[in-house]
Amino acid sequence: MRILPTDWHLYSQDLSSPDAGPLPTEFAFDVNENIALIGKVTEDKSKMHSVMDEAFGVQVNYYDGQVTFTQKVKIKSDKASLSGFVYYMICNEEMCVPKDMEFDIVIGG
């Protein structure tokens, strides 16, 4: 699913200065007894840009286009649903917009 307009960028979960600058991408998972999360959400950093951002005055990590975020899970039934929210910030050359998106992914079955 593409959530990013073509002239905007999305910030990484890992920002060099978490107390200053843009909001990092963050995932919040709903509790589900049929799913165990294994580790934390990872991101494909092969297309990540790391630059000094003049607007924020700090080093930032961001993506243009698409990035893949992955959460490993162990399902404890034949079919389970992984749901929650992703919180993120997108920016272009003129402005930044904080956003959130609900997700619900059926696994198995």
Image: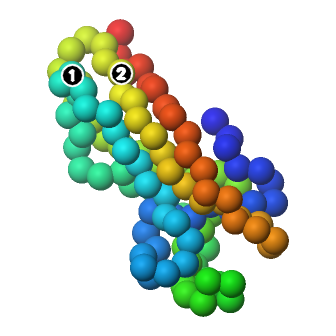
Above-or-below relation of 44 to 74:
below
Q: Write down the residue under mark 1.
A: 34
Please tell me in which quadrant of the rendered image residue 48 appears. bottom right
Q: Secondary structure at mark 1?
A: loop
Please tell me in which quadrant of the rendered image residue 31 appears. top left
**Label disc, if present, on residue 81 of the rendered structure:** 2
Left or right: residue 60 versus residue 19 is right
- In percent of width and height, residue 12 lies at 51, 64
At x 68%, y 59%, the residue is 97
At x 42%, y 76%, the residue is 18
At x 44%, y 54%, the residue is 26
> Tag 1: Cα neighbours inside 10 Å, few (<14), some, or many (≥20)?
some
Q: Mark 1 and 2 residues: CB-CB less than 8 Å, in contact? A: yes
What's under tag 1, amino acid-wise?
Answer: Asn
Give me the C-alpha separation between circle 1 and circle 2: 8 Å
- Viewer can see residue 47: no
**Label disc, if present, on residue 3 of the rendered structure:** none
